[in-house]
Image (cartoon, rainbow, N blue to C red):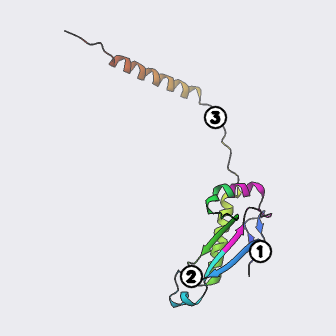
Amino acid sequence: MARPLIVNAAITIPAAELGISYARSAGPGGQNVNKVNSKAILRWRVVDSPSLPEGVRQRFLAHFGSRITNDGEIVIAADEHREQPRNLTACYERLRAMILSVAKPPTRRVKTRPSRGAVERRIESKQRNSQKKQQRRGGFNAD
């Protein structure tokens, strides 16, 4: 019943890599909750997934490392809907959002130098503060 997860044009996770199980839900549904396995649990072994590019995998592990089990799996559960298929779709969407958040590499910071005017204003300000503090240092008058 698993389907492949299409993240974007470059990243698709095949259904064979995704493990799906169902459990009793604690969410909405009344008596239905006690009878039906409507909670969806999605497992994906991130550590050795060949469908994820290496750079994206490294960023994923760094960003979501606290959510990854000792076996290298990410476990996503959804039980906010009454129906099993909607909870499964919610799991897929959460995983997709997680991958998309780290898919684009962070932009590099370009070093810039302060303008000459900014440097001059900074130095003038420092000189004014220095003079102000020198004026405060008055000698002690023992009259």
Q: Report helix, strand or loop for mark 2.
A: loop
Q: Depth check: 57 or 101 in front? A: 57
Crowd rating for badge 3 (residues with CA inside 10 Å; few <14, some 14–19, many 20+): few
The answer to whether 123 is drawn above or below residue 57 in the figure is above
Q: Position of residue 54 (x, y in %)?
A: 77, 56
Within the magenta stretch, is there residue 58?
yes
Q: Residue at x 24, y 11 (%)?
A: 141
Looking at the image, the residue that sits furthest to the front is 70
| Amino acid at pointer 1 | Ala
Q: Residue at x 67, y 39 (%)?
A: 110
Q: Badges 3 and 2: C-beta atoms under 8 Å apart?
A: no
First in sequence, mark 3 or 2: give its number: 2
| Amino acid at pointer 2 | Ser
- Residue 112's tag is 3
- Residue 25's tag is 2
Q: Which residue is mark 1?
A: 15
Q: Report helix, strand or loop for mark 1.
A: helix
Q: Position of residue 103 (x, y in %)?
A: 71, 58
Image quadrant containing the C terminus: top left
- In this picture, which residue range is highlighted in magenta? 42-60
First in sequence, mark 3 or 1: give its number: 1
- Residue 40's tag is none
Camera-nearest label, 1 or 2? 2
Q: Specify whether 30 is left or right of 53.
A: left
